[in-house]
Image (spheres, helix red, strand yellow):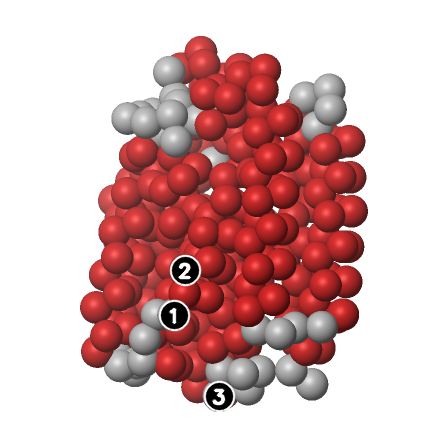
Amino acid sequence: MVNKLQKKWLAIKLITRMDKPIGTYLLLWPTYWALWIASDGWPNFHLLIVFSLGVFIMRSAGCVINDIADIKVDGQVERTKNRPLVSGLMTKEQAVNLFGVLIGCALGLVLTLSWPTIYLSVVALVLAASYPFMKRYTQLPQVVLGAAFSWGMIMAFAEIMGEIPLIAWLLFVANLLWTVAYDTMYAMVDREDDIAIGVKSTAILFGEHDKRIIGFLQLLVLGLLYTVGDMLAFGWPFQLSLVISAGLFSYQQLLIVNRERDKCFQAFLHNHWVGMIIFIGIFIEYL
């Protein structure tokens, strides 16, 4: 009995990527940017808990639906060949049930918010559920992922301010472009496998121009964030966070210069620090 429970827990932990929290961090930091800015640096405890738990739950749900969508192809990719649905540690039916439970938990959280935010949460659900299937129909699945990873920012502004100001949309676009940049690095890890099995990605679309386009996207992100800081009259702490982020982006370019799989994956992981540094800059601005 204990052994069965341990196996079930292991399967849940692996399919929701609890052992790989980088996705949660990359979703959490931009959400915190929005919460702090929308609330002038003082988000109330209820919203902090709801949005923090929402990030964890929706990221977990996104991983589950991703594995369900990729059940027939994960076994052909070196990095994903041991995932629970491929190895048999979890059945497809169990995964679908788990996805339903996670969405139910997310719904419970969002029902504590205002009706406009509840309506916006439907868009978040559609984006999260549709992203895994986009790689079969478009070369730009990372754009859909970027929208999914950024929609919580729109919900935060709507909940706190009762409107979605220009600053919210600038942050949305900045985070979307940042997501495309770092997820292209992630896709560079699997590019050869994806080409062989017919899965689409920006890494394949960009081809030999991948590093230049990633660099251009990173510059756009910094430009948009600088514009947000200027509109909010932020001072040196936020500006310093952008300078440090520019240095981190430069380091990532060095990592991907030869398109080595391990280095591209390392560059992807490194983006956690970018999100954190920008949040620290915003946090200090409101002290």
- Which of the image's four quarters has the N terminus? bottom left
Q: Nearer the viewer, residue 269 or 219?
A: 219
SS category of the residue bearing label 3: loop
On residue 169, the disc is: 2
Q: Earlier in the sequence, mark 3 or mark 1?
A: 3
Compared with residue 208, is residue 279 higher up or lower down, i.e. above or below? Answer: below
Does 16 sit above or below residue 142? below
Real-space Cα distance between discs 2 and 1? 7 Å
Q: How many residues crowd mark 3 within 10 Å: few (<14), some (14–19), many (20+)?
A: few
Q: Viewed as shown, does residue 208 lie left or right of 66?
A: right
Residue identified by numbered label 3: 44
Identify the secondary structure beneath mark 1. loop
Residue at the image point whose x is 73% and y is 20% from the top = 258
Does label 3 or label 2 sit earlier along the sequence? 3
- Which residue lies under the disc numbered 1? 165
SS of the residue at dot 2? helix
Q: Amino acid at mark 2?
A: Trp
Q: Are marks 2 and 1 in contact (CB under 8 Å)?
A: yes
**Residue 9 in the image: x percent, y percent?**
47, 56
Query: Which of these two is toward me, 273 or 69?
Result: 273
Whole-percent x and y of residue 210?
58, 24
Q: CA distance from mark 3 to mark 2?
A: 22 Å
Q: Residue at x 76, y 55 (%)?
A: 243
Q: Count residues near mark 2 (Cα–Cα under 10 Å), then give few for <14, some for 14-19, many for 20+.
A: some
